[in-house]
Image: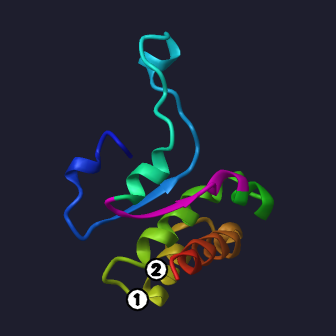
Amino acid sequence: AIRYENFLKDDGVIVLNDVRIDPMPVVIGAVKYPENIVENLKKSHVVYSVDAKTKANEMGNSRVFNLIILGLAAKHLDFKKEDWLEVIKETVPPKTVEINQKAFLYGYDLAD
């Protein structure tokens, strides 16, 4: 999020999966991982942060973490919630429609 915040327009919103992924310079010890990332981003932006991977695991399917993030982002896009749910229904395997829609709605409701 920090690397790309300069591309965000003034009224933009940051949606992030709050999971630490060390870039190679941190892995090899060339630089330290920044501290207080979310807090610092919130000083100048609207930030929605969620540990989507943990929530997806709690829902019973670790792969739906992306639908949680999509739900959060969708709240700030110009499409109706019902349209998103229909697209999910039409594009995921039939046996996963319910869990994918549930994950999407969880993320969507976090943006309230």
Q: Nearer the viewer, residue 91 or 100?
A: 100
Q: Which residues are magenta?
A: 44-54
In the rendered view, how is the structure colored?
rainbow
Which of the 4 image quadrants contains residue 78? Answer: bottom left
Is residue 3 rendered to the left or right of residue 63?
A: left
Q: Nearer the viewer, residue 49 or 70?
A: 49
Mark 2 burial class by Cα count in 10 Å: few <14, some 14-19, many 20+? some
Which of the 4 image quadrants contains residue 106? Answer: bottom right
Q: Is residue 46 a member of the stretch shown in magenta?
A: yes
- Residue 80: x and y in percent read 40, 88
* Structural distance between the alpha carbons of marks 2 and 1: 7 Å
- Residue 109: x and y in percent read 58, 80
Is residue 11 rendered to the left or right of residue 92?
A: left
Query: Residue 67: which disc?
Result: none
Query: Residue at 51% across / 72% down in the picture?
Result: 71
| Residue 54 higher or lower than 71, as above or below | above
- Residue 86: x and y in percent read 50, 83
| Residue 20 higher or lower than 82, as above or below | above
Query: Residue at 50% across / 36% down in the picture?
Result: 35
Element type where label 1 sits in the image: loop
Three-letter code for the amino acid on which mark 1 is drawn: Lys
- Residue 85: x and y in percent read 52, 81
Query: Residue at 41% across / 59% down in the picture?
Result: 42
Number of marks: 2
Three-letter code for the amino acid on which mark 2 is drawn: Trp
Query: Residue 84: which disc?
Result: 2
2 and 1 marks in contact (CB < 8 Å)? yes
Q: Dot 1 corresponds to which residue?
A: 80
Element type where label 2 sits in the image: helix
Is residue 20 rendered to the left or right of residue 40?
A: right
